[in-house]
Image (cartoon, rainbow, N blue to C red):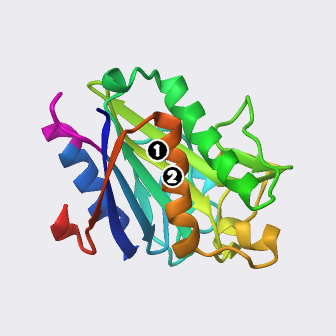
Amino acid sequence: MARLIVRSLGPDTVYEDVFRAMRTFTDARSESTADELWLTEHAPVFTQGQAGRAEYLLAPGNIPVVQSDRGGQVTYHGPGQIVGYLMFDLRRLGLTVRTLVRNIEASVVALLADYGIDAAPRTDAPGVYVGRDKIAALGLRVRRGYSYHGLSLNVDMDLTPYARIVPCGLTGTGVTTMAVLTGGGACVAEVTPRLVDKLVAQYGFDEVVDVQAPSMAGI
């Protein structure tokens, strides 16, 4: 049976703490380690991908910038945005990096459709888009056949920090939220379990164990 542990880390987590915990988990895991999905809302932060270009950081100001080891360019995390970290054994699940990405995108598209939002991925840039606006970003890393990092979904957040960067290095692409597109009919507490359900169905997990981990001491 494919087993998934879902950890709720709570809001206002410090990105560096979660990043460090993800790497520790991935380094320590073995073929018998259950896959995990971590869910959180980060305190405001800009994160740079491995190949992140400095020119895409326009004016970060008082929001910290953290160098990450995920793929992609610079993005923003903050309250009102669901961040999901997928610590999956790709071999056990029969996944390639491409199918890992495509399944995340398909899960988000299906979730948004439930809210009447017509969204789609793009062939030239990972993520999920509504027209020319990005609503979900992806950034992943795979080591020893194990994935970490994951996705961010804009639910009901302040979008003004995005004006300080070129999001994901995509010029001419805007950002939007579920709340904007539904007239306010979306919140993190209500959307999060629905997102989990879509991911569980997409990846075919048979057993899901929910773990409340309100602090990093629980990791």
Distance from the alpha carbon under mark 1 to that under mark 2: 5 Å
Any part of residue 52 in sight: no
Quadrant where the C terminus is found in the figure: bottom left
Mark number, residue 20: none
185 with respect to 143 (left or right): right
Hey, what amino acid is under mark 2?
Asp
**What residue lies at 23% left-to-right and 40% top-to-bottom?**
34
**What residue lies at 45% left-to-right and 34% top-to-bottom?**
204
Q: Is residue 33 magenta?
A: yes
Q: Nearer the viewer, residue 50 or 114?
A: 114
Q: Establish if 129 lies above or below 81.
A: above
Q: Establish if 86 lies above or below 133.
A: above
Secondary structure, mark 1, is helix
**What residue lies at 39% left-to-right and 38% top-to-bottom?**
205
Any part of residue 97 in sight: yes
1 with respect to 82 (left or right): left
**What residue lies at 22% left-to-right and 68% top-to-bottom?**
216
Neighbours of disc 1 within 10 Å: few (<14), some (14-19), many (20+): some
Q: Which residue corresponds to mark 1? A: 200
* Residue range highlighted in magenta: 26-35
125 with respect to 52 (left or right): right
Q: Is residue 69 magenta?
A: no
Secondary structure, mark 2, is helix
Relative image position of residue 81 (x, y in whole percent): 56, 68
Q: Establish if 138 lies above or below 144.
A: below
Task: Tell me whether the residue at label 1 lies in contact with that at label 2, contact meaning CB atoms closer than 8 angstroms.
Answer: yes
Q: Which residue corresponds to mark 2? A: 197
Relative image position of residue 97 (x, y in whole percent): 47, 25
Quadrant where the N terminus is found in the figure: top left
